[in-house]
Structures are given as C-alpha cells and as structure tokens.
Image (cartoon, rainbow, N blue to C red):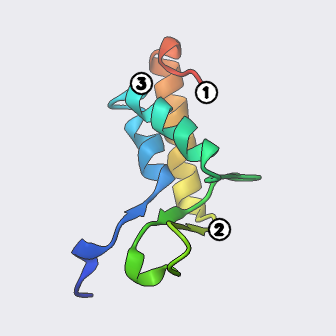
C-alpha cells in the first residue's frame, strides 16, 4: 500500500456523477463547476483534477488528468440513467 495518500487532493468527476443518486442538486452544481473549470472533454468528464501541490509546478493550481477510463464512464452513464429515470426534475444539466 502506498504511503502518504492522505495528503493527496484529487477530484474525480465520476464520483460527483455517482453522487447524483444521493444529492442531485449539489452534484449537479458541482458538475457545472467542474465543466466550467475544463474537466469536461469531448467524450465526457476527464478522469481527475489533481490539486496535490507536491506534484504541481509553482505556477499551477491544478493538473487535469486527461484520460477516460471505460468503467468510470460506464458508472457515470448508469448513474445519469438512474438519476434521470427516478426523478427527471432533479437533473438540470
């Protein structure tokens, strides 16, 4: 197991998408904020945004992890579907 992970600050947009099923309004607002900050790519949300200062140049506040993991995209699609089908009024994207 890797040590020091507690000091890492990494945001995974797919986790916010999954939160749509639990807190749809807050998750929707967070997804909008992530999109405004460049986390939305051509194929969906990128894998992560890394805010861990020890891995960043001094001039940068974050680094976008520009990859798409198929299983995270699939979990996101399922979460969107469940959230929309259970209460269409909750989704305002």
Circle 3 packing at 10 Å, graded few (<14), some (14-19), many (20+), is some
Q: Residue furthest front?
A: 59
Q: Secondary structure at mark 3?
A: helix
Circle 2 packing at 10 Å, graded few (<14), some (14-19), many (20+), is few
Task: Residue at 39%, 30% (x, y): give it.
Answer: 26
Q: Quadrant of residue 52?
A: bottom left
Percent x, y of residue 6? 22, 73
Q: Could you tell me how far apart the alpha carbons at marks 3 and 2 are, in whole angstroms? A: 26 Å
Q: Tell which of 47 and 56 is nearer to you.
A: 56
Percent x, y of residue 48? 51, 63
Q: Which mark is residue 25?
A: 3
**67 on left or right of 2:** right
Q: Could you tell me how far apart the alpha carbons at marks 3 and 1 are, in whole angstroms? A: 10 Å
Task: Residue at 55%, 62% (x, y): give it.
Answer: 47
Marks 1 and 2, the one that precedes in the sequence = 2
Percent x, y of residue 11? 43, 58
Q: Secondary structure at mark 2?
A: loop
Circle 1 packing at 10 Å, graded few (<14), some (14-19), many (20+), is few
Q: Secondary structure at mark 1?
A: loop
Q: Tell which of 62 and 75 is nearer to you.
A: 62
Marks 3 and 1, the one that precedes in the sequence = 3
Task: Residue at 65%, 52% (x, y): give it.
Answer: 38
Q: Which mark is residue 66?
A: 2
Percent x, y of residue 18? 42, 42
Instruction: Find out whether the residues at labels 1 and 2 contact each other: C-beta distance under 8 Å.
Output: no
Quadrant location of the C terminus?
top right
Q: Residue furthest top?
A: 89
Q: Which mark is residue 93?
A: 1
Q: Could you tell me how far apart the alpha carbons at marks 1 and 2 are, in whole angstroms? A: 22 Å
Q: Quadrant of residue 80?
A: top right
Task: Residue at 22%, 87% (x, y): give it.
Answer: 3
| Residue 51 versus residue 83 in the image, above or below | below
């Amino acid at each position: 197991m890797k040590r020091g992970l507690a000091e890492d600050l990494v945001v995974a947009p797919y986790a916010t998408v999954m939160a749509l099923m639990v807190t749809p309004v807050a998750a929707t607002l967070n997804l909008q904020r992530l999109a405004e900050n460049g986390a939305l790519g051509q194929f969906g949300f990128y894998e992560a945004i890394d805010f861990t200062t020890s891995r960043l140049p001094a001039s940068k506040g974050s680094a976008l992890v520009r990859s798409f993991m198929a299983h995270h995209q699939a979990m996101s699609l399922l979460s969107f579907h469940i959230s929309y089908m259970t209460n269409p009024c909750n989704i305002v994207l």
